Image (cartoon, coloured by chain):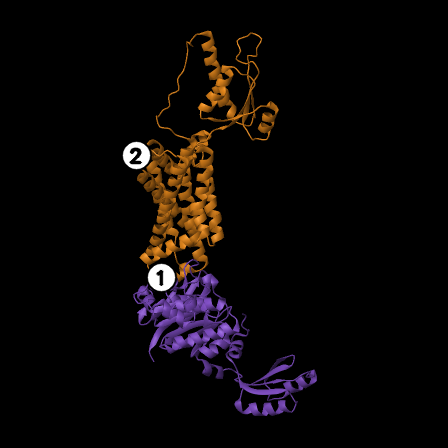
Chain colours: A purple, B orange
Amino acid sequence: MEKVIKVKNLIKKYDKLIAVNNISFDVFKGEIFGLLGENGAGKTTTLEMIEGLRRPTAGKIEVLGCDIIEHRDAVKERIGVQLQSSAYYQFLTLTEILDLFGSFYSKQLSADKLLSMVDLKDKSNSFIGSLSGGQRQRFSIVASLVNDPEVVFLDEPTTGLDPLARRNLWDLITEIKNQGKTVILTTHYMEEAEILCDRVAIMNNGKILVMGDTHKLIDQAKYPYTVSFIKEGMPKSQIQKLEKLSLVENLFGKNNHFIVRIAKKENSNSVKKIIESLNPETVTQGRASLEDLFIELTGSKIEE
Amino acid sequence: MWKLFTADLKMLSRNRQSLFWVLFFPLMFTFIFGLFFGRNTNVGTIAVINKSDTQIAAGLPDVLEKSDVFKIQKEDDLNVAKDEIKRSKISAAIYIPEGFGNPSPASPKQIEIIYDPGSQVYSSLSGVVGQYLTSVNYQIQNSKPIFTSTLKPVTDRKLTYFDFVLAGVLGLAIMNSSIIGIGVNLSKYREDKILKRITTTPVKSWKFIMAEVLSRLVINLIQISIILLVGKFLFDAHIYGSILIIILVALVGAFLFQSVGFIVASFSRTADAAQGMAQAIAIPMMFLAGVFFPIDSLPKWLYLIVQYLPLAPILRIIRGVMLEGLSPFFEPKNVIIVLFWIVLTLAVSIWKFRLSDE
């Protein structure tokens, strides 16, 4: 597979703080690659070094075959960037903003076409201030496509949006991928990464903890299988009894909702039978999530 | 760059807050000073209570009216006039008693000038009244004064305080719109990450900055023209020099203050901080650089300092051209100070101002 981004031994230091600590990874053409991690993990700094906005302290970055330090402007012609929580000109209409940003590139898509792509054509003569949060974010993403880029960088594209708006953006990002573009996104929503990303790298304290195909990574979790159940008024003694069973390796629960995490697939059915004997309201067998893997790796739960 | 330039012009014309600082704020000063000191203005209203029917008594209101300095209001009752002075409705009153001007020895020989000590009008009023009475005295005695003096203005040109202030308002307008406009606007762009967003594109920083500078100079051109037009045609301002040169000097000044604006934007992280910093620079300069008053009336030690403030030499040049029809180079020191500030502020802004965060 063709590598569109090659990052090798990348380091970024701010005085004594090491924001990015010797990371290496590649991004392949046409995939959605996710950089995941908590706030301050080094995702945005990494992304901005690849975009040519920050100079690395050490290491090498190649984007579309060009060294980002030596050929920054040439690379900028071929990439699209959506910054984290960036605003646009307050007193220009959406069409005027897209026309203006398009004029910075040698190749330019029409504002009408771009606005249609995100259902904002009827807002073409509106100012950005009149848009809802979801519409603004859709506009922000589509503004990163003005030059019909080969690689699109999306930094926390769904942060602060309601669930419906977030799902709309997932559709948009998938559509961008379907157009043959490579997408690199950062997020701290594990569910989002699991649904959107072909491959992910989980970062913590400037380092990549694990990287690979999203679903194969989940299999690498210590407890990749789960049995979850709901039981009203489960007595403490019953919970303790369940915890003592050798098949139940990791019980996690609160109130009426419990999850048993299981290391081996063959144990999943046996655990289910044990749970069913407790007469729960529901029992579901499932797989661990990216969030489970993340918690396992970092020992923390992502804070929104 | 053309797109950036036209986009900047559109944004400036649509931004009401910016329009206030650029147009309405200086126009407000032009109107206020124009109404006080421009066309058909006088130093105050004088009530005349004339109880005498002599020719001498009747001549005084005529002389006052013809002086073009006072507005005359005829009154019957001295107490009503006094009340109006107390309530600041008029500046002074002249009481001419019954029989004044009559040659009989028993008739009154004095008129009264009643004035508000807080008003400056009495000195000019007593001068005009005194001059009239002296001429009447000489006429009656059929003699002529031996020693006299004549007033000779240094220039034949008619100049008013409004002319002085209009040049000051021009300087104030370009200073405020440039320092506050550039400083606050770019800091807001930085705060909103618009500058950062620009750096993600291949557009060169100098093109972005040039578009910002040129679009604001166009707005300055409109601003200067409107102020001059309002001053000239609504309030009869006297402009003796070339309007083109006045505009050019003002635009050079605007460029200087834009550089100051870039420095403000370089050192402030937020638009609020930039607003504070810009005002901390502009407000003292507004009062100390000679916008409203000649700075040579300041204490000498202070004058020695403030004459070098960036706005002071610009105002001296504008006034030299506008009020005396001189060349902008009439006093090379002014040009040297302006050039010094341009080089200094430009160097600091080139050194410090960045679109990107690092």
x and y percentages locating residue A246 in the rendered image: 61, 89
**How busy is the neighbourhood of tag 1: few (under 14 within 10 Å), some, or many (20 plus)?**
many
The residue sitting at 45% across, 39% down in the picture is B31
**x%, y% of residue B172?**
42, 41
Q: Nearer the viewer, residue A151 or A18?
A: A151
Q: Which mark is residue B327?
A: 2
Q: B326 and A115: which one is in front?
A: A115
Q: CA distance from mark 2 to mark 1?
A: 42 Å
Under mark 2, the amino acid is Ser
Q: Which residue is mark 1?
A: A100
Badge 2: residue crowd in 10 Å (few <14, some 14–19, many ≥20): some
Count of numbered labels shown in the rendering? 2
Q: Residue at x 31, y 72 (%)?
A: A65
Observer-nearest of A300 and A165 = A165
> Residue shown at 37%/46% (left/top)?
B222
- Circle 1 SS class: helix
Q: Is residue B316 left or right of residue B44?
A: left
Quadrant position of residue A114: bottom left
Name the quadrant of the N terminus of chain B.
bottom left
